[in-house]
Amino acid sequence: MDPMVLYLKENVLLGEKFEADKVRRKTPQFWLSEDQKLYKRSFSGPYLLCMHLETTELLLEELHEGICGIHTEGKSLSHRALTQGYWWPNMQNEALEYVKKCDQCQRFAPNIHQLGRVLNPLSSPWPFAQWGRE
């Protein structure tokens, strides 16, 4: 995100030609506010505030375990962050990893009571052929 902020602020591209072209192509999706905050344009909602990776852990903690936290799964946790107006790269993967580290979610998750092996289908329907005839 820092190369995009630099490009939007001062129209300067740094690094290799491939990386500079990548930043130039992705920059129209973003907007820099007057207070130097980077926002991502969304299709059907407000601008999304771009978060640095250092602050995403605190945001996920507040959304997952905070005052209004409901210990949701990873995909719904990342969707909740989007609806609250936040965005960062790889947010779904980070939300999944955060939920995997949550002790309460792992301890009280619903157990799967299904057999761990493949079920054997009946090889012949002949024993059931007489059920419909009376």
Image (tube, grey):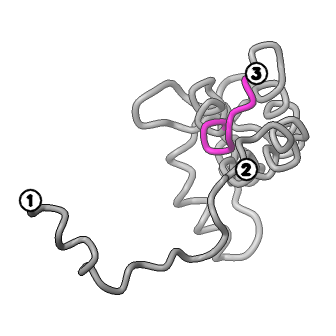
Residue kind at label 2, given as amino acid type: Leu
| Mark 1 vs mark 3: in front | 1
x and y percent of residue 64 in the render? 77, 29
> Which residue is located at x 8 percent, y 59 percent?
134
Name the image quarter holding residue 36: top right
**Quadrant of res 80:** top right
Q: Is residue 48 magenta?
A: no
Q: Is residue 52 above or below residue 44?
A: below
- Label for residue 51? none
The three-letter amino acid code for the residue at tag 3 is Gly
For the view shown, which residue lies furthest in the left direction? 134
Mark 1 or mark 3: whose residue is earlier in sequence: 3
Give the residue at mark 1: 134
Disc 2 is placed on an element classified as helix
| N-terminal-most mark, 3 or 2 | 3
Using a 10 Å C-alpha cutoff, classify the residue at mark 2 as few (fewer than 14 neighbours), some (14 to 19) or many (20 or more).
some
SS at mark 3 in the image: loop
Determine the CA span between mark 3 and mark 2.
Answer: 16 Å
- Extreme residue in the bottom direction: 123
Q: Which residue is mark 3?
A: 69
